[in-house]
Image (tube, helix red, strand yellow):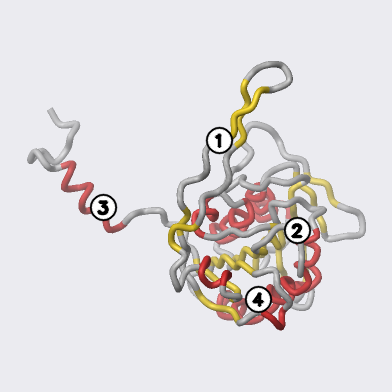
Amino acid sequence: MHILISNDDGYRAPGIHALARVMRRFGRVTIVAPDHNHSGASNSLTLNRPLTVEHMPGESLYVVSGTPSDCVHVALTGLLEDRPDLVVSGINCGANMGDDTMYSGTVAAAIEGHLFGIPSIAFSQIDKGWSELEAAAEVAAAVVDRFAEPAIAAKEPMLLNVNIPNMPRAALKGIVATRLGRRSSAEPVIREMSPRGFPIYWLGAAGKPSDASEGTDFWATSHGFVSVTPLQTDLTNHRQVALAGEWLNSDGVPDVLSE
């Protein structure tokens, strides 16, 4: 296989190099990663300035002056000579579970690959600090070994979000398929005064899990399991399409713009 790797922690992060080492077991690896940390960048693309791409001599490593989504987008629309078979992102320094996936640059890089019709997997460690990183990399290899072949063969490319507890591999209880949990609202912003005398604001910490019931990614990882959550990019609330139509037609007029 040809595997494209990106992340949101930047090209120097230990996680991306640990991931690249184990991915080379499956074939050729190309890394296209941001020049600095873009945590929380979500699916943003850089449209207000040109991007630079630096090829590190002697390595299949390209450093992009943009977001994780930029990296994968540039790779797939002109940088790479051949289309990769798989896109992997991470290993991220910190969890991407529940509502986190809406903000995650790690997940966004995988989503970008999926939007181009390529099976894509995002990998994250639960705790920050890179403890048990090699064990996490071995888990990533096990997930790719299990999922890559059926994902590539599938008519609809698979998009997976994988969260790995910071534990020795022997201590992990297994790998389970999960759904996304939910978080409570974020903590209030922290207001401070700048040295120049005007107010500045730090975003508050993420909310505590509000749905960590059995079957969620929160439950799985807190009980020593690796969580694998299939994602989709269709944001349509299909159950409410008919309801929205009823609201629009509530006065018997099918088009609210009609005279």
Is there a contact, CB below 8 Å, between mark 2 and mark 1?
Answer: no
Q: Indicate the quadrant where residue 153 lies.
A: bottom right
Residue picked out by circle 3: 241
Residue picked out by circle 1: 189
State the image coordinates of residue 168 (x, y, percent, origin top left): 73, 77
**Earlier-in-chain disc, 2 versus 3:** 2
Amino acid type, label 4: Val
Identify whether 158 is placed above or below 66.
Answer: below
Judge the density around disc 1: few (<14), some (14-19), many (≥20) Cα neighbours within 10 Å: few
Q: Indicate the quadrant where residue 89 lies.
A: bottom right
The residue nearer to you, when weighing 138 against 200, is: 200
The residue nearer to you, when weighing 211 against 21, is: 211
Give the foreground label among 4 and 2. Answer: 2
Compute the Cα span from label 3 to label 4: 36 Å
Is disc 3 placed on a helix, strand or loop? helix
Is disc 2 placed on a helix, strand or loop? loop
Residue picked out by circle 2: 129
* Horizontal relation, residue 244 to residue 1: left or right: left
Compute the Cα span from label 2 to label 1: 24 Å
Judge the density around disc 2: few (<14), some (14-19), many (≥20) Cα neighbours within 10 Å: few
Which quadrant, please, contains the N terminus? Answer: bottom right
Is there a contact, CB below 8 Å, between mark 3 and mark 1?
Answer: no
State the image coordinates of residue 207 (x, y, percent, origin top left): 51, 50
